Image (cartoon, rainbow, N blue to C red):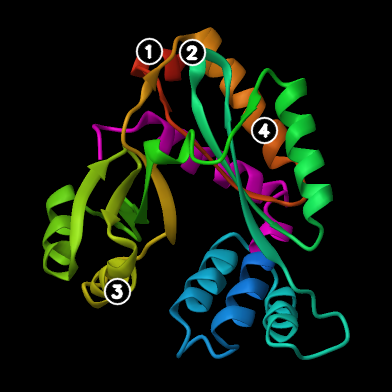
């Protein structure tokens, strides 16, 4: 993983704002449905479902919504939906590489929405494989610095996760980013829990191996494109390899 990622900080703050708007509710519920359908409706035996439920709860998704999503994913009820995961690749302003992860029950609609959002907001679609090689699949856990009335240090987090398979701990200001192989995600998350450390999210994510530095204008344009993509109903996650200095982030 290359350096300290300002984008990781921005994405974390942006996710918190989006959650407050209720913008993320549908995406979080869809994650639960897919996790339950793939690995079963029992979170104790399905770590992916467990993490999806925890993330939804931390974003204030009502318990009734979560329970219904688990049942739908488990095939209980008449409104069960079968989603397909699709990954689109593209370029944003300043040559920033982008991966757009969709969960959809209509591939044609998803493709049209992503292409339209890209075109209207200064991006271009790319051929499969032309962008994805710039990213690596990793387990990413976000740990808040403030743990109740106690402030956690980077050393506290490092000691808790080192033997569980964590590769890196990045200080992102108000939170720490713990990076591991996807196969070690559950072990690292469990190690944090056993150490008494709370976490905001635990996801298999795509981390860029090379980052593109952007100025204020470039960062503004890229964030506008990401917003447009995330407004698409079928888009679950957008990954981008842009980075910006502290000065640029402060202006944003």
Position of residue 127 measured from the top left corner of the image (x, y, whole percent):
58, 34
> Pointer 1 and pointer 3: residues touching (CB < 8 Å)?
no
Between 48 and 134, which is closer to the camera in this rendering?
Answer: 134
The residue labelled by disc 3 is: 193
Q: Is residue 69 left or right of residue 4?
A: right
Element under disc 2: helix
- Residue 198 seen by the camera: yes
> Pointer 3 and pointer 2: residues touching (CB < 8 Å)?
no
> Residue at 45% of width from left, 90% of height from top?
45
Position of residue 15 measured from the top left corner of the image (x, y, whole percent):
56, 45
> Residue at 68% of width from left, 17% of height from top?
122
> Pointer 2 and pointer 1: residues touching (CB < 8 Å)?
yes
Element under disc 4: helix
Q: Is residue 61 left or right of residue 196?
A: right
> Residue at 18% of width from left, 65% of height from top?
165
Q: Depth-wise, is mark 4 or mark 1 nearer the camera?
A: 4
Sequence-first disc among 4 and 2: 4
Between 179 and 98, which is closer to the camera in this rendering?
Answer: 98
In three-dimensional space, the C-alpha distance between marks 3 and 4, rounded to whole angstroms, equals 33 Å
Q: Is residue 7 magenta?
A: yes
Query: Residue 247 — which label?
Result: 1
Q: Main secondary structure of the magenta part?
A: helix
Element under disc 3: helix
Q: Depth-wise, is mark 3 or mark 4 nearer the camera?
A: 4
Query: Residue 227 — which label?
Result: 4
Position of residue 96 measured from the top left corner of the image (x, y, whole percent):
49, 23
Sequence-first disc among 1 and 3: 3
> Residue at 23% of width from left, 73% of height from top?
191
Q: Is residue 164 left or right of residue 99?
A: left
In three-dimensional space, the C-alpha distance between marks 4 and 2, rounded to whole angstroms, equals 18 Å
The residue labelled by disc 2 is: 251
- Density class for disc 2 (Cα within 10 Å; few <14, some 14-19, many ≥20) is few
């Amino acid at each position: 993983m290359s350096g300290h990622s300002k984008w990781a900080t921005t994405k974390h703050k942006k996710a918190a704002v989006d959650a407050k708007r209720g913008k993320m509710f549908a995406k979080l519920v869809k994650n639960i449905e897919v996790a339950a359908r793939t690995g079963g409706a029992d979170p104790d035996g399905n770590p992916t479902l467990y993490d999806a439920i925890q993330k939804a709860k931390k974003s204030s998704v009502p318990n009734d919504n979560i329970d219904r999503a688990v049942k739908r994913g488990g095939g209980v009820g008449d409104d069960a939906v079968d989603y397909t995961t699709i990954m689109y690749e593209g370029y944003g302003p300043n040559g920033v590489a982008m991966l757009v992860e969709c969960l959809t029950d209509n591939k044609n609609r998803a493709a049209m929405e992503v292409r339209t959002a890209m075109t209207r907001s200064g991006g271009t679609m790319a051929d499969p494989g032309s962008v994805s090689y710039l990213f690596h699949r990793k387990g990413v856990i976000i740990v808040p610095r403030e743990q109740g009335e106690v402030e956690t240090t980077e050393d506290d987090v490092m000691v808790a996760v080192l033997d569980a398979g964590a590769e890196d701990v990045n200080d992102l200001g108000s939170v720490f980013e713990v990076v591991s192989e996807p196969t070690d995600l559950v072990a690292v998350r469990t190690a944090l829990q056993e150490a008494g450390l709370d976490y905001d999210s635990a996801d298999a994510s795509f981390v860029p191996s090379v980052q593109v530095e952007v100025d204020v204008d470039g960062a503004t344009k890229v964030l506008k494109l990401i917003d447009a993509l995330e407004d698409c109903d079928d888009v679950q996650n957008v990954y981008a390899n842009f980075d910006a200095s502290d000065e640029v982030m402060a202006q944003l």
